[in-house]
């Protein structure tokens, strides 16, 4: 039929986290399409979240997600308390973002970590970073 376009196809999203400084604790992962909820996915009912046991390299599989623009935020929760611990305002545990978005004075913008899901498999290689 002319003039009818197909709806964007969902895509499979996975990621590999490298550079973890220890195999202690867990990696908390959040995949969101909400710029206002990035990088903390609390209160984001449509976010895809994972908790994976830490190791030297962590594989994350978010499965099939609807087409759209997304960003991933990771936390190496070394003490297993379910959150990113801080010293004053500086992260005391590891963190990482899709597209290895640069971190300056606070977390990166959604736009700098964003990638498109458009029917093809999306793989993000994320390098963990530590401030202490």
Image (spheres, helix red, strand yellow):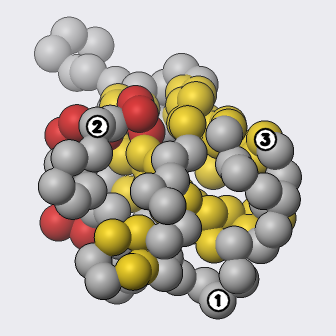
Q: Which of the 4 image quarters holds residue 86?
A: bottom left
Residue at 83% in and 59% down: 23
- Residue closer to the observer: 28 or 24: 24
Residue 131, picture quadrant: bottom left
Work out which residue is located at the far top of the displayed protein and give it: 2
Are the residues tagged 3 and 1 within 8 Å (C-beta)?
no
Residue at 30% x, 83% y: name it.
Answer: 88
The residue closer to the viewer here, 9 or 31, is 31
Front residue of 65/124: it is 124
Give the secondary structure at mark 2: loop
Name the image quarter holding residue 78. bottom right
Pointers 2 and 1 in contact (C-beta within 8 Å): no
Question: Left of 132 or right of it: where is 112?
Answer: left
Image vertical order of residue 68 relative to residue 40, above or below? above
Q: Secondary structure at mark 1?
A: loop
Label 3 vs 1, first from the N-terminus: 3
Tell which of 132 and 113 is nearer to you.
Answer: 132
Residue to which mark 3 is pinned? 57
Across and down, in percent, residue 122 comes to 54, 27
In the picture, the quarter occupied by the N terminus is: top left
User: CA–CA distance between discs 3 and 1?
Assistant: 20 Å
Residue highlighted by disc 2: 102
Mark 2 crowd level (few <14, some 14–19, many ≥20, 10 Å Cα):
some
Q: Is residue 26 visible?
A: yes
Is 108 located above or below residue 14 in the figure?
below
């Amino acid at each position: 039929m002319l003039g009818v376009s197909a709806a964007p196809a969902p895509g499979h999203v996975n990621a590999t986290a490298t550079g973890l400084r220890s195999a202690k604790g867990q990696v908390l992962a959040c995949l969101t399409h909400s710029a206002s909820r990035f990088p903390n996915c609390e209160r984001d009912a449509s976010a895809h979240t994972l908790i994976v046991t830490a190791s030297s390299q962590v594989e994350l599989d978010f499965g099939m997600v609807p087409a759209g623009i997304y960003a991933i935020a990771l936390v190496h929760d070394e003490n297993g308390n379910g959150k990113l611990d801080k010293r004053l305002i500086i992260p005391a545990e590891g963190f990482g973002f899709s597209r290895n978005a640069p971190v300056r004075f606070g977390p990166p913008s959604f736009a700098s970590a964003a990638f498109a899901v458009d029917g093809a498999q999306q793989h993000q290689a994320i390098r963990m970073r530590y401030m202490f």
